Amino acid sequence: MRIIIDIGHPAHVHYFKHLISYLQSNGHILLISARNKEMTQYLLNQLGINFIDRGRGKNSVFGKLLYLVKTDALLFNVSRKFKPDLFLGFGSFYVAQVAFLLKKPSIILDDTENAKFSQLFYKKFASSILSPSTFKPYFGDKHIKFESYMELCYLHPKHFKVDNSLLQSIGVEENDKYTVVRFVSWKAHHDFGHKGISIENKIRAVNEFSKYGKVFITSEKEIPIELEQFRLKINPEHIHHLLAKATLFYGESATMASESAVLGTPAIYLDNVGRGYTDEQESRYGLVFNYSESMEDQMKSINQGCEILSNDSIDYQSKRKKMLNEKIDLTSFLIWFINNYPKSMQIMKVTPEFQSKFK
């Protein structure tokens, strides 16, 4: 099968890397398109995955619409030469629209309820939509929900093992307490109107957490000069090894909060809208603590972080075990779904419990 996979964010590299490896090693011919966003293309290069560059994208609404037209045109021309049998992407309205124009099937994954811009432009064009069961919208018969999180594509125990030597390279020993802090740029299309954690509370949080152990900051934007000493110095592709052994994750990234949770690290996530999956990771598994961006909640979240760091009695790994027992290995599911498409779509409609075989 000839497949085009579109990657628009560093997280998408992780979502699809094991799938790409399997498909290529089993005779499928792939073409990867990638946005030049943050570490996306760096990660692809580190993995030895060839791709075509679809540019940087824009921040304004008008700029995003213009970029949509340009990217659709680029992918349309590339696709006519490549002649794909199937298109795949995460929230990628580009591949959904181009596939529709070429009368080819497309599979779109999504887990971000407030990504209304993406959903507006893909939901009528996609052939199939896949999302976690926690995803609140439902887009009709072509929408299948699975019992997993996107982060289990690459952090399921079948696909990920911690390398302690990577931690030692930044001065972390086996039993060290430490916190990973993440600040985002708030420039994504679903981030309009968000401000995140105030500069004062960023400094306050780091100062409080540093009383209990090391603090490592990873940030999409500039950080106050007072916090530069805490900036993380590790290759981006190794971040999950750090999260797996952390005592606490604190920040504005839903993906990194969920990554921490599926690794058994308690996570504090701040966002006015939140996510269905982090809500479940809090209410069902006790692995995430969700807060809004209000000043009151910012203070509460810092206090919550100190409470977690000072309390060694809670076994978060047992909570993780419960979660893994109830969720599927998403990469194995996607491999089956693509190999058997479109029959797999009908199977999932009639017998959704079929997915339990991928635990």
Image: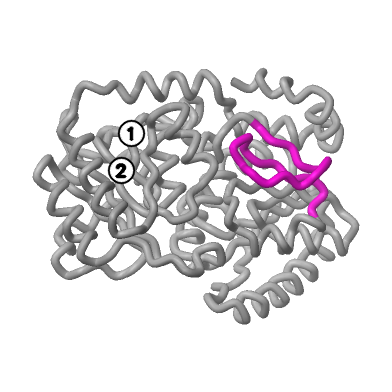
**Residue at horizontal 55 percent and vertical 36 percent from the top:** 149
Task: Write down the region rendered in magenta.
Answer: 126-146
**Any mark on residue 265, and which?**
1
Q: Residue at x 70, y 55 (%)?
A: 31
Name the spot of residue 117 as percent of width and height, x first: 65, 64
- Residue 340, horizontal then vertical, whole percent: 81, 32
Which one is earlier in the sequence, the residue at label 1 or at label 2?
Answer: 2
Local secondary structure at mark 2: strand
Instruction: Work out which quarter of the rendered image holds the N terminus and state it.
Output: top right
Q: Is residue 188 left or right of residue 167?
A: right
Disc 2 packing (10 Å; few <14; some 14–19; many ≥20)? many
Pointers 1 and 2 in contact (C-beta within 8 Å)? yes
Q: Position of residue 41 (x, y in %)?
A: 51, 61
Q: Nearer the viewer, residue 82 or 66?
A: 66
Q: Magenta includes 139? A: yes
**Is residue 208 within the magenta segment?**
no
Disc 2 marks a residue whose amino acid type is Phe
Judging by the rendered image, the residue that carries numbered circle 2 is 249
The circle drawn on residue 142 is none
User: Does 183 sit above or below residue 320?
Assistant: below
Identity, as a three-letter code, of the amino acid under mark 1 = Thr
